[in-house]
Amino acid sequence: MSKKYDLSGHLAVVTGASSGIGLCFCRTLASMGCNLVMVSNQQPQLDECASSVTRDSGVRTYPLFCDLTRPDASKVIMDYCDLKGLDPDILINNAGIFSFLPVTDTTERKLGCFVDLHVRAVTMLSREFAIRFKERGGGHILNMSSMSCWTPMPGIAMYAATKAFIRVFSRALHYEMRDDNVHVTVACPGGIATDLFGLPKNLMKLAVNIHAIQTPEKFTRKAVRMMLKGKMQYINGWMNRLAIFFVGITPTPVRMLVKHRMLDRNISRP
């Protein structure tokens, strides 16, 4: 990392920090010298990951077990920071869930989780930290949307709809907080080399090599840089930017073909 992005003495709160992209965000920030409040609902993994990040980078980590679907989750996190005397100036709302199930086959509890995690938790944490950052004279918020926010495809209705909320909400908040030196960025990743879609390892490696998808490490490095520059939105890769147009003009028969040939095969019933 360039010294331009030295975050020594800074503190970031990262949700969904015990695995996947969230853990990559933590490692990216730690490589820049940033201390971390690592939030997750996976207690054993969280403690292990926090210890690993500290051991590898030397930064201070504060593992906080918290279920973000709780109505008071934002208060739990703010109270924890106050109790520890912590003054974060970066928030990364990364925690999320995914499902290939159609809405009618999704339990009410799972539907509620999408709303609680992608809408309420993101909204309340963004609000609470925006207030704090305004009072302290500045700060950065990075909210994780998805390329699916432009993709009303059958089978991922709840995921796409709630990710669309995150994008629109974050862009509006960016303008609201602009005069207060609080920078709000929304990332809309598409094509990240994770296990989310069950792609075979050999095909995943090929996709990375031809730049069809990005590694989580490369994505988080660029997303953090965009956040620190105060950019309003980050979409990784020219292919994803181009895909937005084609998704918008995709006819219904093609969408249904994708559903029947691809999405339905990945459905796992509750």
Image (cartoon, grey):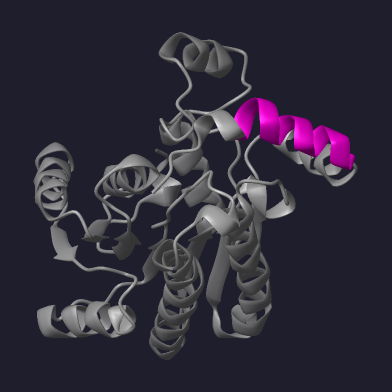
Q: Residue at x 41, y 34 (%)?
A: 217
Q: On the picture, is 216 further left or further right than 169?
A: left
Q: How many marks?
A: 0
Question: Where does the magenta region start and end?
Answer: 250-263
Does the rendering let one see residue 58?
A: yes
Residue 254 drawn in magenta: yes
**Residue 169, how many percent across, how many down?**
63, 73
Q: On the picture, is 92 further left or further right than 180?
A: left
Q: Which is more toward the observer, 147 or 180?
A: 147
Residue 168 drawn in magenta: no
**Residue 126, how many percent across, how many down?**
46, 77
Q: Which is more toward the observer, 75 or 262?
A: 262
**Residue 253, how many percent across, how many down?**
86, 35
Does the rendering let one see residue 242?
A: no
Q: Main secondary structure of the magenta part?
A: helix
**Residue 198, how many percent across, how many down?**
45, 26
Q: Residue at x 19, y 76 (%)?
A: 86
Q: Which is more toward the observer, 253 or 38?
A: 253
